[in-house]
Image: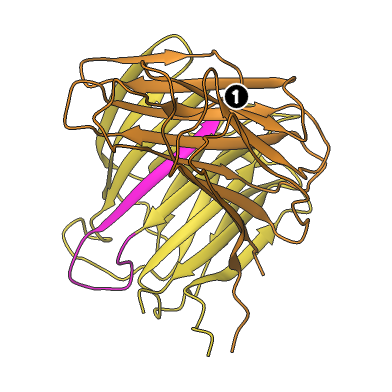
Amino acid sequence: MATSTYNLIASQVVGSGGAASVTFSSIPGTYTDLKVVMSTRYSGASETNQLISINGSSSTFSMIQLYGGGTGVGSYTTPAQYAGNVGGTNYTANTFNNIEVYIPNYTSSNYKSYSVDAVTETNASAVSMGLAAGLWSTTSAITSLSFAPSSGSYVQYSTFYLYGIRNS
Amino acid sequence: MASAPTYTPIATQTLGSATATITFSSIPQTYTDLIVVASVQSGGASQMNLTFNGDTGNNYSKTALYGNGSSALSLRGTNNPAITVAFTDSSPNYSPSIIQIMNYANTTTYKSVLIRTSYSGEVDAAVGLWRGNTGSAAQAITSITLANGSNYSSSSTFTLYGIASA
């Protein structure tokens, strides 16, 4: 049997107490790319930004975002650590955001570029789609990833899955 | 018993020197979908163009969304000689692209492509279509070419994955 090249490295499901942030640490350096798949909701009211930190760092990030909210589109460069939109109590009950972050060549000595795809459909007016190009201008290999809403905390049943993808 | 892998690397290329064109050829017809993951750099912002089976006829179309940090727009092109994937980045940055090609092996449907890409000046999402090398004949995809208007820089990477539905 061939060895799988698309593997679940770790997963986290937020419990009843909520979580201010979620971190994947000690990420093995044995894959080519990383992919994080998230289903999130937070404790605040209005939609907010989800932020990414890499190796504990919140600096040297830059980002370009393409955003649609159902009535118009826009493009933005802040916040630099943008990694998707997270809905709160203004969202329809039981709806969670779908967010995917893809990081190619995460162990290389190049700057780390990544893509973010974030969507929410609520069957109501509070909806969003955010596509982003992210850049962490640091040459270190990525060994940990953290995600947090810009305020408040993730609510119960938010899920985070980290996959490793090998090219051979 | 472990199930067979359904996300399989078919081929990968890491450039050792500046190269204008890369091709994945002799693609096996045993998967359902294909995914190309590219992380590329060039000497300056230049377009990366996607073609299939060596066809450079005016048989491609594309609709795209762009954002540059201050404005967003949508563009469309028809009867083009390639699908423009994106601009490539220049040193020290590498621009990531993910290209998904659905049902690439059949000979009954035109080939749809989903593209997510970006570089330091832009974020892009697009859908493309190839109508075969006559513009009206569905064909299986056996090779994929990504040509750069300039050269891809050394260390640019390209990996072709096959996705099996069963």
Residue B89 or residue A40, whichever sits in front: A40
Residue at the spot 59% in from the left edge and 74% down from the top edge? A4
Rendering quarter of residue A68: top left
Q: State the SS at label 1.
A: loop
Which range of residues does the magenta coloring cover? B102-121
Residue at the spot 37% in from the left edge and 24% down from the top edge? A88
Rendering quarter of residue A82: top right
Residue B83 or residue A10, whichever sits in front: A10
Which residue is tagged 1?
Answer: B120
Is B103 within the magenta? yes
Mark 1 residue crowding within 10 angstroms, few (<14) / some (14–19) / many (20+):
many
Image height of B51 relative to A114, above or below:
below
Chain on which label 1 sits: B
Residue B68 or residue A17, whichever sits in front: A17
Residue A22 visible in image: yes
Is B147 within the magenta? no
Q: Which chain is orange?
A: A
Q: Position of residue B62 (x, y in %)?
A: 29, 39
Quadrant in the picture for the C terminus of chain B: bottom left
Q: Amino acid at mark 1?
A: Ser
Rendering quarter of residue A80: top right
Residue B166 or residue B125, whichever sits in front: B166
Q: Which chain is yellow?
A: B
Residue at the spot 54% in from the left edge and 63% down from the top edge? B160
Q: Position of residue B26 (x, y in %)?
A: 49, 75
Image height of A33 relative to A166, above or below:
above
Image height of B52 relative to B162, above or below:
above
Q: Which residue is at the far front?
A: A17
Compared across the picture, whether B100 is left or right of A116 comes to left
Q: Position of residue B162 (x, y in %)?
A: 47, 69
Residue at the spot 37% in from the left edge and 26% down from the top edge? A87
